[in-house]
Image (cartoon, rainbow, N blue to C red):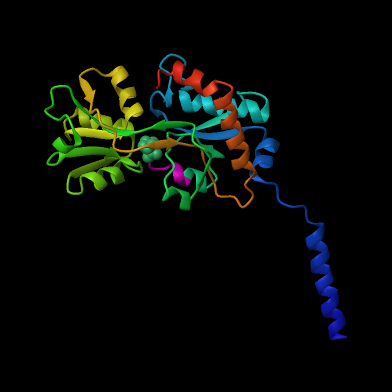
Amino acid sequence: MKKLICLLILSLVFLTGCGKKPEKNALEQILDRDVLVVGVKTDSKPFGFISNTSGDYEGFDVDVARYIAKDLLGSERKIKFVSIDSSNRIEAITSGQVDMAIATMSITPQRQYLIDFSIPYYIAGQTAMVREDSDIYSFGDLKRKTIIISLGSTAEKNIRRILPTTKMIGYKSHHEAFQALQEGKGDALSDDDVILAGYMIDNQGYRLIKTRISREPYAIGIKQYEDKTLKITLDDIITRMKKDGTIKELKEKWHLK
Ligand code: GLU
Protein backbone atom coordinates (compact mmCIF):
# COMPACT_ATOMS: atom_id res chain seq x y z
CA MET A 1 0.00 0.00 0.00
CA LYS A 2 2.77 2.39 1.05
CA LYS A 3 4.53 1.65 -2.23
CA LEU A 4 1.37 2.42 -4.17
CA ILE A 5 0.88 5.80 -2.43
CA CYS A 6 4.53 6.68 -3.12
CA LEU A 7 4.10 5.79 -6.77
CA LEU A 8 0.92 7.88 -6.97
CA ILE A 9 2.62 10.93 -5.44
CA LEU A 10 5.62 10.53 -7.74
CA SER A 11 3.45 10.32 -10.85
CA LEU A 12 1.45 13.37 -9.71
CA VAL A 13 4.65 15.39 -9.24
CA PHE A 14 5.87 14.20 -12.63
CA LEU A 15 2.57 15.00 -14.39
CA THR A 16 2.16 18.48 -12.91
CA GLY A 17 5.82 19.18 -13.72
CA CYS A 18 5.24 18.17 -17.33
CA GLY A 19 2.05 20.20 -17.55
CA LYS A 20 3.82 23.41 -16.50
CA LYS A 21 4.69 25.71 -19.37
CA PRO A 22 8.41 26.50 -19.45
CA GLU A 23 9.15 30.01 -18.17
CA LYS A 24 9.57 32.55 -20.92
CA ASN A 25 13.09 33.62 -21.69
CA ALA A 26 14.23 37.24 -21.31
CA LEU A 27 13.64 38.06 -24.98
CA GLU A 28 10.11 36.59 -24.95
CA GLN A 29 9.31 38.60 -21.83
CA ILE A 30 10.38 41.82 -23.62
CA LEU A 31 8.31 40.88 -26.67
CA ASP A 32 5.25 40.19 -24.47
CA ARG A 33 5.66 43.48 -22.62
CA ASP A 34 6.12 45.29 -25.94
CA VAL A 35 8.42 47.85 -24.33
CA LEU A 36 12.19 47.72 -23.97
CA VAL A 37 13.58 49.06 -20.68
CA VAL A 38 17.09 50.41 -21.22
CA GLY A 39 19.49 51.95 -18.74
CA VAL A 40 21.46 54.80 -20.29
CA LYS A 41 23.73 57.53 -18.98
CA THR A 42 22.70 61.17 -18.69
CA ASP A 43 26.19 62.43 -17.85
CA SER A 44 28.23 61.02 -20.73
CA LYS A 45 27.94 63.21 -23.80
CA PRO A 46 27.97 62.23 -26.67
CA PHE A 47 26.91 58.69 -25.60
CA GLY A 48 24.09 59.43 -23.17
CA PHE A 49 22.79 62.84 -22.12
CA ILE A 50 19.60 64.90 -21.89
CA SER A 51 19.12 67.33 -24.76
CA ASN A 52 18.97 70.99 -23.72
CA THR A 53 16.43 71.69 -26.43
CA SER A 54 14.07 68.70 -26.42
CA GLY A 55 14.63 67.51 -22.83
CA ASP A 56 14.84 64.01 -24.30
CA TYR A 57 17.49 61.29 -23.97
CA GLU A 58 20.11 61.62 -26.71
CA GLY A 59 23.46 60.21 -27.77
CA PHE A 60 25.22 57.32 -29.44
CA ASP A 61 24.10 54.78 -26.82
CA VAL A 62 20.54 56.12 -26.96
CA ASP A 63 20.53 55.67 -30.75
CA VAL A 64 21.80 52.10 -30.37
CA ALA A 65 18.93 51.46 -27.92
CA ARG A 66 16.38 52.92 -30.36
CA TYR A 67 17.71 50.72 -33.18
CA ILE A 68 17.31 47.65 -30.97
CA ALA A 69 13.73 48.62 -29.98
CA LYS A 70 12.84 49.08 -33.65
CA ASP A 71 14.39 45.75 -34.52
CA LEU A 72 12.73 43.80 -31.72
CA LEU A 73 9.40 45.58 -31.33
CA GLY A 74 8.90 47.37 -34.64
CA SER A 75 9.16 50.91 -33.27
CA GLU A 76 11.97 52.93 -31.73
CA ARG A 77 9.34 54.57 -29.54
CA LYS A 78 8.62 51.33 -27.66
CA ILE A 79 11.33 52.09 -25.18
CA LYS A 80 11.55 53.28 -21.61
CA PHE A 81 14.84 54.88 -20.65
CA VAL A 82 16.12 54.68 -17.11
CA SER A 83 18.93 57.02 -16.05
CA ILE A 84 21.86 55.08 -14.61
CA ASP A 85 25.47 55.94 -13.83
CA SER A 86 28.78 54.11 -13.58
CA SER A 87 28.32 53.32 -9.89
CA ASN A 88 24.83 51.75 -10.07
CA ARG A 89 24.57 50.20 -13.55
CA ILE A 90 25.57 46.62 -12.58
CA GLU A 91 22.93 46.61 -9.85
CA ALA A 92 20.33 48.01 -12.26
CA ILE A 93 21.04 45.01 -14.51
CA THR A 94 21.25 42.25 -11.89
CA SER A 95 18.13 43.47 -10.02
CA GLY A 96 16.08 43.44 -13.23
CA GLN A 97 15.38 47.19 -13.04
CA VAL A 98 16.44 47.37 -16.71
CA ASP A 99 16.44 44.77 -19.50
CA MET A 100 19.85 46.01 -20.56
CA ALA A 101 22.36 48.79 -19.96
CA ILE A 102 23.78 50.66 -22.93
CA ALA A 103 25.94 52.96 -20.90
CA THR A 104 29.57 53.40 -22.08
CA MET A 105 30.20 50.14 -20.27
CA SER A 106 33.45 48.33 -21.03
CA ILE A 107 33.72 44.57 -21.03
CA THR A 108 36.02 43.53 -18.18
CA PRO A 109 36.76 40.07 -16.73
CA GLN A 110 35.55 41.23 -13.27
CA ARG A 111 32.21 42.42 -14.64
CA GLN A 112 31.83 39.19 -16.61
CA TYR A 113 31.49 37.36 -13.27
CA LEU A 114 28.36 39.37 -12.57
CA ILE A 115 26.70 40.09 -15.92
CA ASP A 116 26.76 39.05 -19.57
CA PHE A 117 27.92 41.33 -22.36
CA SER A 118 27.04 41.55 -26.02
CA ILE A 119 29.86 41.82 -28.53
CA PRO A 120 31.39 45.34 -28.48
CA TYR A 121 29.83 48.15 -30.52
CA TYR A 122 32.48 50.84 -29.89
CA ILE A 123 36.10 50.97 -28.73
CA ALA A 124 37.22 53.85 -26.50
CA GLY A 125 40.36 54.28 -24.42
CA GLN A 126 41.25 55.85 -21.11
CA THR A 127 43.20 59.07 -20.84
CA ALA A 128 43.11 62.16 -18.61
CA MET A 129 41.96 65.76 -18.87
CA VAL A 130 43.82 68.68 -17.31
CA ARG A 131 43.37 72.43 -17.23
CA GLU A 132 44.91 74.06 -20.29
CA ASP A 133 47.53 75.95 -18.23
CA SER A 134 48.58 72.80 -16.35
CA ASP A 135 52.19 71.55 -16.40
CA ILE A 136 50.95 67.95 -16.85
CA TYR A 137 51.55 66.43 -20.28
CA SER A 138 51.85 62.71 -19.56
CA PHE A 139 50.73 60.13 -17.01
CA GLY A 140 54.29 60.23 -15.68
CA ASP A 141 53.71 63.88 -14.69
CA LEU A 142 50.78 62.75 -12.51
CA LYS A 143 52.87 60.70 -10.04
CA ARG A 144 52.71 63.18 -7.18
CA LYS A 145 49.40 64.77 -8.13
CA THR A 146 45.75 64.06 -7.34
CA ILE A 147 43.63 62.27 -9.93
CA ILE A 148 39.84 62.48 -9.99
CA ILE A 149 37.85 59.45 -11.21
CA SER A 150 34.21 58.31 -11.42
CA LEU A 151 33.38 55.51 -8.98
CA GLY A 152 32.40 52.21 -10.60
CA SER A 153 34.36 53.02 -13.74
CA THR A 154 37.39 51.18 -15.06
CA ALA A 155 39.46 54.34 -14.49
CA GLU A 156 40.36 53.54 -10.88
CA LYS A 157 41.83 50.13 -11.66
CA ASN A 158 43.74 51.34 -14.70
CA ILE A 159 45.29 54.22 -12.75
CA ARG A 160 46.23 51.89 -9.87
CA ARG A 161 48.02 49.67 -12.39
CA ILE A 162 50.24 52.41 -13.82
CA LEU A 163 50.45 54.81 -10.85
CA PRO A 164 50.07 52.64 -7.73
CA THR A 165 50.86 55.37 -5.20
CA THR A 166 49.13 58.35 -6.76
CA LYS A 167 46.32 59.95 -4.75
CA MET A 168 42.88 59.37 -6.23
CA ILE A 169 39.50 60.81 -5.35
CA GLY A 170 36.26 59.30 -6.62
CA TYR A 171 32.83 60.75 -7.37
CA LYS A 172 29.50 59.05 -8.07
CA SER A 173 29.00 60.48 -11.56
CA HIS A 174 31.04 61.94 -14.40
CA HIS A 175 29.27 65.28 -13.74
CA GLU A 176 30.44 65.40 -10.15
CA ALA A 177 33.94 64.30 -11.18
CA PHE A 178 34.14 67.07 -13.77
CA GLN A 179 32.82 69.61 -11.28
CA ALA A 180 35.59 68.55 -8.89
CA LEU A 181 38.18 69.28 -11.58
CA GLN A 182 36.56 72.67 -12.22
CA GLU A 183 36.75 73.44 -8.50
CA GLY A 184 40.43 72.47 -8.38
CA LYS A 185 39.91 69.47 -6.08
CA GLY A 186 42.35 67.47 -8.22
CA ASP A 187 44.98 68.02 -10.89
CA ALA A 188 43.50 65.75 -13.57
CA LEU A 189 40.31 63.87 -14.36
CA SER A 190 40.87 60.40 -15.78
CA ASP A 191 38.15 58.72 -17.80
CA ASP A 192 37.43 57.44 -21.31
CA ASP A 193 38.76 59.80 -23.99
CA VAL A 194 35.33 60.15 -25.65
CA ILE A 195 33.60 61.08 -22.38
CA LEU A 196 36.27 63.66 -21.54
CA ALA A 197 36.08 65.07 -25.06
CA GLY A 198 32.31 65.32 -24.50
CA TYR A 199 32.92 67.62 -21.51
CA MET A 200 35.25 69.74 -23.64
CA ILE A 201 32.39 70.41 -26.12
CA ASP A 202 30.64 72.60 -23.54
CA ASN A 203 33.60 73.73 -21.45
CA GLN A 204 36.62 75.76 -22.55
CA GLY A 205 40.05 75.74 -20.95
CA TYR A 206 40.90 72.02 -20.82
CA ARG A 207 43.05 69.62 -22.81
CA LEU A 208 43.60 65.86 -22.98
CA ILE A 209 46.81 63.94 -22.32
CA LYS A 210 47.71 62.34 -25.63
CA THR A 211 48.35 58.78 -24.38
CA ARG A 212 45.64 56.16 -23.94
CA ILE A 213 46.35 53.81 -21.03
CA SER A 214 43.69 51.21 -21.84
CA ARG A 215 41.36 49.79 -24.47
CA GLU A 216 37.70 50.14 -23.48
CA PRO A 217 35.35 47.95 -25.55
CA TYR A 218 31.79 49.28 -25.02
CA ALA A 219 29.13 46.57 -24.98
CA ILE A 220 25.54 46.05 -23.88
CA GLY A 221 25.24 44.63 -20.38
CA ILE A 222 22.47 42.14 -19.52
CA LYS A 223 21.62 39.82 -16.64
CA GLN A 224 23.27 36.38 -16.67
CA TYR A 225 20.43 34.19 -17.90
CA GLU A 226 20.86 30.46 -18.40
CA ASP A 227 19.03 30.85 -21.70
CA LYS A 228 21.34 32.93 -23.90
CA THR A 229 18.70 33.88 -26.53
CA LEU A 230 18.77 37.59 -25.60
CA LYS A 231 22.56 37.79 -25.77
CA ILE A 232 22.66 35.96 -29.10
CA THR A 233 19.95 38.28 -30.49
CA LEU A 234 21.84 41.39 -29.35
CA ASP A 235 25.07 40.07 -30.89
CA ASP A 236 23.19 39.54 -34.16
CA ILE A 237 21.77 43.07 -34.08
CA ILE A 238 25.19 44.64 -33.39
CA THR A 239 26.77 42.58 -36.16
CA ARG A 240 24.06 43.88 -38.51
CA MET A 241 24.58 47.49 -37.31
CA LYS A 242 28.26 47.13 -38.18
CA LYS A 243 27.53 45.58 -41.58
CA ASP A 244 24.70 47.89 -42.68
CA GLY A 245 26.70 51.05 -41.91
CA THR A 246 24.61 52.13 -38.88
CA ILE A 247 27.59 52.19 -36.50
CA LYS A 248 29.58 54.22 -39.03
CA GLU A 249 26.67 56.67 -39.44
CA LEU A 250 26.32 57.02 -35.66
CA LYS A 251 30.04 57.72 -35.30
CA GLU A 252 29.71 60.48 -37.91
CA LYS A 253 26.54 61.85 -36.29
CA TRP A 254 28.23 62.11 -32.88
CA HIS A 255 31.66 63.16 -34.23
CA LEU A 256 33.44 60.05 -32.99
CA LYS A 257 36.43 58.27 -34.52
N1 GLU B 1 34.05 52.67 -20.07
C1 GLU B 1 34.54 52.73 -18.75
C2 GLU B 1 33.77 51.82 -17.83
O1 GLU B 1 32.96 51.05 -18.28
C3 GLU B 1 34.57 54.14 -18.18
C4 GLU B 1 33.36 54.98 -18.46
C5 GLU B 1 32.19 54.69 -17.57
O2 GLU B 1 32.33 54.65 -16.37
O3 GLU B 1 31.13 54.47 -18.11
O4 GLU B 1 33.98 51.83 -16.65
- 198 left or right of 228? left
- Quadrant hosting ligand 1: top left
The residue closer to the viewer here, 83 or 119, is 119
Residue drawn 22% across the image and 42% down it: 169
Looking at the image, residue 173 sits to the left or right of residue 90; the answer is left
166 left or right of 251 in image = left
Please tell me which residue is depicted at 47% across the width and 49% down the height of the picture: 112
| Position in image of residue 174 (x %, y %) | 32, 33
Residue 183 in magenta? Answer: no
**103 above or below 252?**
below
| Rendering quarter of residue 244 | top right
The x, y position of residue 195, in whole percent, is 35, 28
Q: Position of residue 202 (x, y in %)?
A: 30, 18
Q: Quadrant of the N terminus?
A: bottom right
Stretch in magenta: 85-91
Residue 256 visible here? yes
Compared to residue 125, the image places residue 199 above or below, namely above
Q: Which residue is at the far front?
A: 243
Q: Residue furthest bottom?
A: 1
Nearer-the-camera pick, 29 or 220: 220
* Rendered residue at 47%/22% (across/down): 58
How many numbered marks does the figure carry? Answer: 0
Residue sticking out furthest to the top: 53
Q: Residue 210: x percent and y percent?
A: 24, 27
Q: Is residue 78 above or below residue 142?
A: above
The answer to whether residue 86 is seen in the rendering is no
